[in-house]
Amino acid sequence: MRTIVLGLGNELLGDEGVGVHAARLLQREKLPENTRVLEVGTAILDALQDLEGAERIIVVDAMKAGDPPGTVYKIPLDCCQGSTCIASMHGFDIFRVMALTALGTTPPVTVFGVEPAQIDWSMELSPAVSQAMPLLLEAVRKEF
């Protein structure tokens, strides 16, 4: 099964970049055959071609759901809510990009989110999100 892992987020905004940080760590590991990890950041349209060949997609991103910072969530994409407006090309979210693919059917998409502690100008993750990183990576690995 061809699996694509997308590390999403803006690494200039602290915990908003958790998906990018996770992707970088996963890329250093020996991955199962047919698994590719992409550090997408905010340029999700760049992943369009890779998504078209995917049989399974795993998304890693920050997710505000109201639990304590560092909480790791695992939910199907259809339980997530996308943005209602596109302010720029960076405004394309996973929902809009999936709609642009040439897929006849959408492959299963699992989202791993981490509750942020701070979204502000910083290239560093907060202590709570940094401490959650091993749990996040292990949860993603289990999906392989």
Image: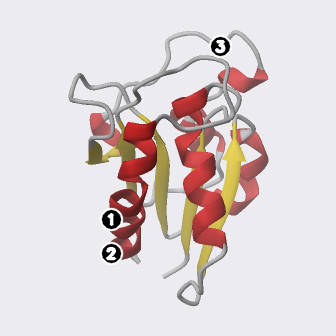
Left or right, residue 22 beside residue 46: left
Q: CA distance from mark 3 to mark 1?
A: 31 Å
Q: Label 1 neighbourhood size at 10 Å, few (<14), some (14-19), many (20+)?
A: some
Q: CA distance from mark 1 to mark 2?
A: 5 Å
| Amino acid at pointer 1 | Ala
Residue at x 58% of width, y 90% of height: 33
Query: Is any part of residue 52 visible from this angle?
Result: no
Left or right, residue 144 beside residue 24: left
| Amino acid at pointer 2 | Lys
- Among the 4 quarters of the image, the one containing residue 100: top right
Residue beneath label 2, please?
Answer: 142
In the current view of this chain or complex, which residue is farthest to the front? 127
Residue beneath label 1, please?
Answer: 139
Q: x%, y% of residue 84?
A: 50, 11
The mark closer to the camera, 2 or 3, is 2
- Among the 4 quarters of the image, the one containing residue 97: top right
Position of the C terminus by quadrant: bottom left
Residue beneath label 3, please?
Answer: 86
| Amino acid at pointer 3 | Ile
Residue at x 23% of width, y 30% of height: 68
Please tell me which of labels 3 and 1 falls first in the chain.
3
Q: CA distance from mark 2 to mark 3?
A: 33 Å
In the rendered structure, are the residues bearing label 3 and label 1 in contact, judged by CB atoms less than 8 Å apart? no
In the rendered structure, are the residues bearing label 2 and label 3 in contact, judged by CB atoms less than 8 Å apart? no
SS for dot 1:
helix
In the rendered structure, are the residues bearing label 1 and label 2 in contact, judged by CB atoms less than 8 Å apart? yes
